[in-house]
Structure formats: C-alpha cells, structure tokens
C-alpha cells in the first residue's frame, strides 16, 4: 500500500497562519506541519506541489538531502524519485521501518523566495510478544506469577485470559498475572494477547498444571451370583495420575492372579472376577496414591440371589488418607421377600 503525504508549505522567515500547498506564485507561506502514519513494511510517497516559477527543489530528511532535482544524494536504495515535473516533485520511501520516522522537508527555490514544506512521518509497528513465561507445574495452594512482554508502536495493550474448560473468568489487563493460592479449577491454559490496532492481536499460551493428591469420586459395592462375572470399579481424580492397588481384607491382590484381572487407567481402576466363587465374596479396598498423598475406599463383593426382588447392596466407604475422613460410598437396599413367602405367613 502507498501512503501519499501531501506536503504543506512554510516560509522560512514567517510564522502563523494556515498551510497551503507550496507554489512559487503565492504571496504568503504560513507555517504548517502534517503528521502522517504508515505501517512498517509499507511504502510512503512524499509529494510536493510546484509550478513553473520554481528553479530548484529538493527533499530532505532532517538536515540530510535525499534528492536535489533529479540527483540522488542519499545511498539508501529504498528512496526513489517518482516525479519531477512542472507541477509535482515526489519521492517514495519503500519498505518503511521505524528509523524512517521523523520530519521530511520539501525545499523550493524561486527567483525571489526560498520556501519549505514539512511533513512528519509516523511509523506504526504490529505487536510482537518478545517474552512469555514457560509452562509451569505447581502444587495446589501455591502462588503463580506469569509474565508477558510485548513490543509495538504504539505500545500494545496486554491482557491475560483463562481459556481452560474449567475457567472461572480470570482476566488481567497487565503484563503480569498473579494467582495466589491456586486451586485445581484454575489449572489449564492461559492466553496472553497483545494488540495495538495496527494489525490483528498476537496471542501465545502458557499451560499451568496444578498438582493435587488423589480423591476417590466413585466406589460402589456390587452384588454378583455365583459363577457370573463381577466387576468392582474405583474412580479417582489426581494430578499426577494416581497409582492404584487392590486389597482383599489385608491381602494385596496381584496382577495376573488366577480368575482376576486388574486394569489401571489414568482416572480409574477396575477389578474383574471372571467366574465368581464363594471365596471371592467379601470386603475389598482400593488405594489410590501419588507423591502428594493417598486415599482409599472400601467396597463389598456380595452374593446376589435370584430370589430377591431388590438385592441388598453392601455400603461402600471411602477413607481419605490425607485427612482421615470417611465418606459413604454406597447405599443400603432392603432385602424383600417374595410375595409367595409373605402369603404363607398369614
């Protein structure tokens, strides 16, 4: 894109008044300054209006002559002469950069009056993030400080946004984001955005991982008839992921034990009985642990009889190894007698 800078005239010895295009036949030449904006990397055209009374003309950047007539005085290949006619004297600066910013002067010499016209070139620069915090892992309850530094012209506005699905609307309009006593709900990605309306905002993200001890969210007792397949499930949330162990009474169950299969995933463990026998019934304990703590839950594998309309399900209990608290992990259902048995009692 080419930006046209229409120069306005200033007589060297005069002051005040409103600017008009440079022309040698004008009686007065008041002082004027134009601020013109161009984006970094674009081209700027400096145009000066003249007439047939002009004998000499030149473009200057501060005190350095760029062009005098058709003669190029500067060594910068980006500066080129566009027009030197009876009505116009124009040059172009290609691939504009920040060091091109400043005043430019069109100097005109007539038979009687030297005249100048000045424009001020302002170069805008798209925002750029130059420094941002690395991904961080921290234990729950700790303090987090994130930094995002950006450059641009004009200076960009920096904002932080929590974009995790568990986001709680954490926003900061500053280079620094401080989180005191961070919780697991505040884990996830934080996005830094830098904008100054010169170009589209630039964004970068920082991942914040919050570590916390295991918490068993689901552990239920299960009723299974003899000879059928039975499953006990233990679900736990933890960062890092929990390691699971199973116990029957006080005896740890080993992987590959005959008739059993232990399947451990990131957030749950499943204990499968392929052919339930009388010896399999009883109390089982699931233990979930990581380097920050442990917790356990007890559940019962009990016999489910076909005569019961609504079988009794043994209560499961969850014990948090981090604070010693017990939680109910199941429910109790009353064992109903068949209607026929009730009828015989009366």
Image: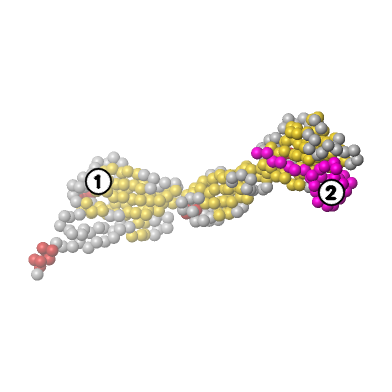
- Check the picture and name the quadrant holding the C terminus: bottom left
Q: In which quarter of the image is residue 217?
A: bottom left
Dominant secondary-structure state across the stretch colored magenta: loop
Q: Does the magenta stretch include residue 25?
A: yes
Q: Residue at x 69, y 37 (%)?
A: 43
Residues at marks 1 and 2 touching, judged by CB atoms closer than 8 Å: no
Report the quarter where the N terminus lies. Answer: top right
Please state if 39 lies on the left or on the right of 282 as rendered: right
- Residues 102 and 306: in front is 102
Foreground residue among 199 and 35: 35
C-alpha separation, residue under disc 1 versus residue under disc 2:
99 Å
Tell me if mark 2 has few (under 14), some (14-19) or many (20+) residues whose alpha carbon lies within 10 angstroms of its own: many
Near-viewer residue (7 or 62)? 7
Query: Residue 60: x percent and y percent?
Result: 81, 37
How far across and down, in percent of the image, does residue 332 sit?
26, 61
The residue located at (53%, 55%) in the rendering is 170
Q: Residues within 10 Å of mark 1 (few under 14, many from 20)?
A: many
Disc marking residue 30? 2
> Looking at the picture, how far across and down is residue 133, in whole percent?
58, 45
Residue 210, visible in the rendered structure: no
Residue at point 22%, 47% (across, down): 229
**Residue 296 image position (x, y, % from top left):** 36, 53
As drawn, the residue found furthest toward the bottom would be 346
Task: Mark 1 or mark 2: name the one nearer the start of the chain.
Answer: 2
Residue 273's disc is 1
Which structural element holds mark 1?
Answer: strand
Q: Viewer-nearest of labels 1 and 2?
A: 2
- Span of residues in magenta: 1-27
Q: Can residue 238 be seen in this view?
A: yes
- Secondary structure under the numbered disc 2 in the rendered image: loop
Judged left or right of residue 102, residue 13 is right
Q: In this view, does 3 lie to the left or right of 263?
A: right
């Amino acid at each position: 894109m080419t930006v046209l800078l229409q120069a306005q005239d200033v007589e060297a010895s005069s002051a005040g008044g409103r600017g008009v295009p440079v022309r040698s036949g004008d009686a007065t030449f008041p002082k004027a300054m134009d601020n013109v904006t161009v984006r970094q990397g674009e081209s700027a055209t400096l145009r000066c209006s003249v007439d047939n009374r002009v004998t000499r003309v030149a473009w200057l950047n501060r005190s350095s002559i760029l062009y005098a007539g058709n003669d190029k005085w500067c060594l910068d290949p980006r500066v080129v002469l566009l027009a030197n006619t009876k009505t116009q004297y124009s040059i172009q600066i290609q691939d504009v950069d920040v060091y091109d910013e400043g005043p430019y002067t069109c100097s005109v010499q007539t038979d009687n009056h030297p005249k100048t016209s000045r424009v001020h070139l302002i170069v805008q620069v798209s925002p750029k993030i130059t420094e941002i915090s690395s991904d961080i892992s921290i234990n729950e309850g700790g303090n987090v400080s994130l930094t995002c530094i950006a450059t641009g012209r004009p200076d960009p506005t920096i904002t932080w946004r929590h974009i995790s699905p568990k986001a709680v609307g954490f926003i900061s309009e500053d280079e620094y984001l401080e989180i005191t006593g961070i919780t697991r709900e505040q884990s996830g990605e934080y996005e830094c955005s830098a904008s100054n309306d010169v170009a589209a905002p630039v964004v970068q993200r920082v991942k914040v991982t919050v570590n916390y001890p295991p918490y068993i969210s689901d552990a239920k007792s299960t009723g299974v008839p003899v000879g059928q397949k039975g499953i006990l499930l233990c679900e736990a949330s933890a960062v890092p992921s929990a390691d699971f162990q199973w116990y029957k009474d006080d005896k740890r169950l080993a992987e590959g034990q005959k008739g059993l299969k232990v399947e451990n995933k990131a957030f749950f463990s499943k204990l499968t009985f392929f052919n339930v026998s009388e010896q399999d019934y009883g109390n089982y304990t699931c233990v979930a642990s990581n380097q920050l703590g442990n917790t356990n839950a007890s559940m019962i594998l009990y016999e489910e009889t076909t005569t019961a309309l609504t079988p009794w399900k043994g209560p499961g209990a969850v014990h948090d190894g981090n604070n010693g608290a017990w939680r109910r992990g199941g429910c109790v259902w009353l064992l109903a007698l068949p209607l026929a048995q009730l009828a015989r009692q009366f």
